[in-house]
Amino acid sequence: MTSPEAALARLPSRRADYPYFCPIQTRWADNDVYGHINNVVYYAWFDTVVNSFLIERSALDIHQGPCIGLVVETHCNYFSPLAFPQKIDAGLRVAHIGSSSVRYELGLFAADNAQSLCAAKGHFVHVYVDKISRRPVPLPERLQHVLESLL
Amino acid sequence: MTSPEAALARLPSRRADYPYFCPIQTRWADNDVYGHINNVVYYAWFDTVVNSFLIERSALDIHQGPCIGLVVETHCNYFSPLAFPQKIDAGLRVAHIGSSSVRYELGLFAADNAQSLCAAKGHFVHVYVDKISRRPVPLPERLQHVLESLL
Amino acid sequence: MTSPEAALARLPSRRADYPYFCPIQTRWADNDVYGHINNVVYYAWFDTVVNSFLIERSALDIHQGPCIGLVVETHCNYFSPLAFPQKIDAGLRVAHIGSSSVRYELGLFAADNAQSLCAAKGHFVHVYVDKISRRPVPLPERLQHVLESLL
Amino acid sequence: MTSPEAALARLPSRRADYPYFCPIQTRWADNDVYGHINNVVYYAWFDTVVNSFLIERSALDIHQGPCIGLVVETHCNYFSPLAFPQKIDAGLRVAHIGSSSVRYELGLFAADNAQSLCAAKGHFVHVYVDKISRRPVPLPERLQHVLESLL
């Protein structure tokens, strides 16, 4: 029922798989009733990693930019639990750049375990659209350049 | 690059695809800076729909149960924006029941649009584990019975 | 050390103290590691109740309005725990209308307990400012009219 | 209508008012539709600062401790906006230690502005209760010792 690619996609990744890292601070409210980070929170971290990277490299202007990245697909596999007050290292790579879209892949690692496999990994796909018309637009040149640095 | 199954998986679903519905109330903080529900929030709704269903049918006891459902995979495709203060109808079906696991599929519909395709759809996979040892356990009989009603 | 007013302010309120009610749906992620609604979440509900009320009465246009309500003070007292999947009734009243500001007071009640004292109560203060300059502006006439209905 | 103490309480504090500081990382989802940190999020930071401090000093064991701190009152005044991706410095002091309770006071400062007045300040009150009976208990000795270091 599952293709070899799909099976592979569900194996944990390694730190070496990601060219860019960003520390993530956990919060008290990230833990759910079972005492571990709620599955939802991982996606809040994904957004934070990608948007921090883009803002830092001047490839995103939230308030004034003419186009915005709409999220059209998100996915996460969870391999081992994380919990507040752990510190997390988030790895980021760009897996695919299309004419209007980009696919980011992320891995989350417990910060105190430098050699570990990831605790979770996921991806999300941005489609760039005009802020007003919400129609797809070509990726801005500056953005494309910045994304290529993470391929 | 994409299999026919994968392509199909990215088409919006219909209300008739789901045997169980649950209304979802949006919150002010669900909207992000672009004025629509943040992609992360959809997963908070998924958790709420599934756990509400299980508690309502007496198939989950958060505090006293001997086993818990760990989320091992989540996924969402976003087709059209939703925004506070819209009301949402969340559809739920069970796509697969394994010996220790269950795959839920969900569709989110704008409540004021009875005939619409979904605005987003997703899935998540629970693996049931012993609360203490965190080793997989067979699905409790009561849970299995309740899940079969949504196949 | 505490004035009589302050002491009074810390007593639970009753349903009859509020002219407007709004149901609140709890979410799985609202519960914290101790199994009850996290103290933070109550404020997400306050925002939701007030903004739902204002939008419903056409006294707030999030996207096009020339002025916005900035929150300058929030407060909450917690009397008894609430927990997902409980349903909540939120009561709202307007305690004070100034030239540019309004003070909302809210009470949260377990929905299955019609006669109860509130489980929590709080307030928050909005100051209306111009969307661009962020300087205080007089309350819009339509808003003032709507607020007076909750005095 | 307002006492001198209340008026004073609404003035911004300074960095020198706090003996303990903790950096706070903002998240994409912390910004609301108006482009600034939502008022609710400040309380998620307060919880994180206090619980991080207590865990770091071995004065809190979330999972095994016999007693827990219930939040009975929270409050915040907002003086100037903060926004993702800003970095925040959170200051913490202990304002009062009772037999079963403690009052924490917090100030939030934009990290890139070393001399600034706070952007927001708040407090919250914990009452320590037995995990099972939920009746107030004396503050554990270790906790009391740790709290005194922040008076």
Image (spheres, coloured by chain):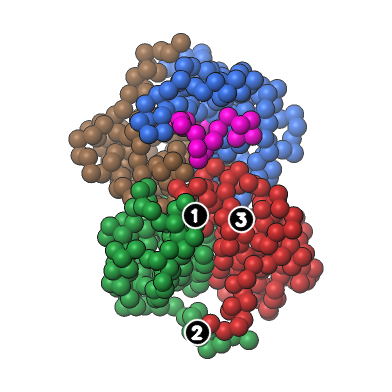
Chain colours: A green, B red, C blue, D brown
Q: Kindly indicate whether the residues beneath marks 1 and 3 are on one polypeptide chain.
A: no
Residue found 57% across the figure and 48% down from its top: B83
Q: Across the whole image, how many numbered discs are drawn on residues?
A: 3
- Name the residue tied to disc 2: B1
Q: Is residue A81 left or right of residue D104?
A: right
Residue found 68% across the figure and 78% down from its top: B98
Give x and y (percent) for residue C145: 60, 20
Q: CA distance from mark 1 to mark 3?
A: 28 Å
Q: Is residue B50 left or right of residue D52?
A: right
Secondary structure under tag 1 reads loop
Q: Residues within 10 Å of mark 3 (few under 14, many from 20)?
A: many
Residue found 33% across the figure and 76% down from its top: A151
Subunit bearing disc 2 = B
Q: Amino acid at mark 2?
A: Met
Specify the quadrant of the image occupied by residue B62.
bottom right
Residue B64 visible in image = no
Mark 2 or 1, closer to the camera: 1
Give x and y (percent) for residue C57: 64, 30
Q: Residues within 10 Å of mark 1 (few under 14, many from 20)?
A: few
- Tell me if residue B136 comes above or below residue A64 in the rendering: below
Of the pair B40 and A115, the residue shown nearer to us? B40
Q: Which residues are magenta?
A: C55-80
- Name the residue tied to disc 1: A133
Q: CA distance from mark 3 to mark 2?
A: 31 Å
